[in-house]
């Protein structure tokens, strides 16, 4: 992972995601400040940041929920500001809050999303089977979504986000509220997806979800405080200690008399 080159010579391979000079203000509060990075196909990139760092705001911009002002988002070569449909067609999203129909089966939930992407009939069924198999959910296709445990519901949502074969999968703290085995299973499944060429942007504040071979973006108070392969970004320091050190709040000042 590297910052975007301002004047490329030979054409670089299309990035799964390229973000240039992105800022966003919520009223008087600066939530994102000049954020730029590039994510290569097939890479797992952890977007690490403490509460309030700006992770969800960044994801809202990347998924087109809010407009970058200023800034540019390019997904698989398509500019989100100028060619929103083409750009959005290349991303799958799993938001922090669950979004599914608890009364319908797992397969029916996926079928609904397939239809939203213009997929139907045998093509949709084969994509559903494939996506569920990738998440280890094949045998649960007929179960009611509301009857699944939390970990399986999340896996269903991840399978659903893959239904249109996106280039980039974006997940906003997907393991919130899950127990340790479910967290480990989901982290494992999503890392494995990268081997199929999908790039993953995984927002988290939990360092145990990040592996040494991953890419890392450290977001703190809206700014990218570090980026690159984990060992490079941390300078080889243990990740948990490094994260605490980087995001340490200044001690409150002594009251003056
Ligand atoms: N809709 C909003 N209106 C006003 N301020 C907002 C809004 N959403 C986020 N903020 C503010 O923007 C800053 C970044 O918040 P954001 O939710 O993007 O951070 P986060 O890293 O996702 O945090 P968390 O891990 O707690 O979800 C915070 O100061 C937050 O209070």
Image (cartoon, grey):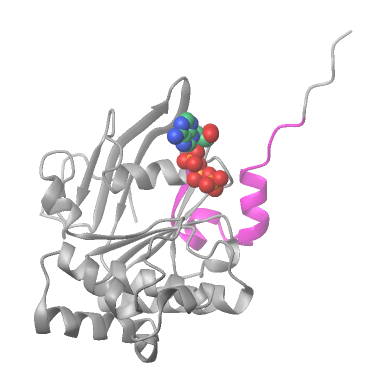
Which of the image's four quarters has the N terminus? bottom left
Which region shows up in magenta? Answer: 225-251
Task: Work out whether residue 231 or residue 129 is closer to the camera in this orientation and state it.
Answer: 129
Residue at image position (67%, 50%) is 244
- Estimate the x, y position of residue 98 in percent, counting from the top left: 44, 60
In the rendered image, is residue 219 in sight?
no
Task: Work out whether residue 242 or residue 123 is closer to the camera in this orientation and state it.
Answer: 123
- Estimate the x, y position of residue 72 in percent, counting from the top left: 23, 38
Q: In the rendered image of this protein, does residue 74 appear above or below residue 193?
A: above
Q: In the rendered image of this protein, does residue 37 appear above or below residue 107?
A: above
Residue farthest along the top direction in this orientation: 257
- Horizontally, residue 147 falls left or right of residue 139, namely right
Residue farthest along the front direction in this orientation: 103
Residue at image position (18%, 83%) is 125
Task: Work out whether residue 91 or residue 114 is closer to the camera in this orientation and state it.
Answer: 114
- Estimate the x, y position of residue 120 in percent, counting from the top left: 11, 75
Residue at image position (35%, 78%) is 106
């Amino acid at each position: 992972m590297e910052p975007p080159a301002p004047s490329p010579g030979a054409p670089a391979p299309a990035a799964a995601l390229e973000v240039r000079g992105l800022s966003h203000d919520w009223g008087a509060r600066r939530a994102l400040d000049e954020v730029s990075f590039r994510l290569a196909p097939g890479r797992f990139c952890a977007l690490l940041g403490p509460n309030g760092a700006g992770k969800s705001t960044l994801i809202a911009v990347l998924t087109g929920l809010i407009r970058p002002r200023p800034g540019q988002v390019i997904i698989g070569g398509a500019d989100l500001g100028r060619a929103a449909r083409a750009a959005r067609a290349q991303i799958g999203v799993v938001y922090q809050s669950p979004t599914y129909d608890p009364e319908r089966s797992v397969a029916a939930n996926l079928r609904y999303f397939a239809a939203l992407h213009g997929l139907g009939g045998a093509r949709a069924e084969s994509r559903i089977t494939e996506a569920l198999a990738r998440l280890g959910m094949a045998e649960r296709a007929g179960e009611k979504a509301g009857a699944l445990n939390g970990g399986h519901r999340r896996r269903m949502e991840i399978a659903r986000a893959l239904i249109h074969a996106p280039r980039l999968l974006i997940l906003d703290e997907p393991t919130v509220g899950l127990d340790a085995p479910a967290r480990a299973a989901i982290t494992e499944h999503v890392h494995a997806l990268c081997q199929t060429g999908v790039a993953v942007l995984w927002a988290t504040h939990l360092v145990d979800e990040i592996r040494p071979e991953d890419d890392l973006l450290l977001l703190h108070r809206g700014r990218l405080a570090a980026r690159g392969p984990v060992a490079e970004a941390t300078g080889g320091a243990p990740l948990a200690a490094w994260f605490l050190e980087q995001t340490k709040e200044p001690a409150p000042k002594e009251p003056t008399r």
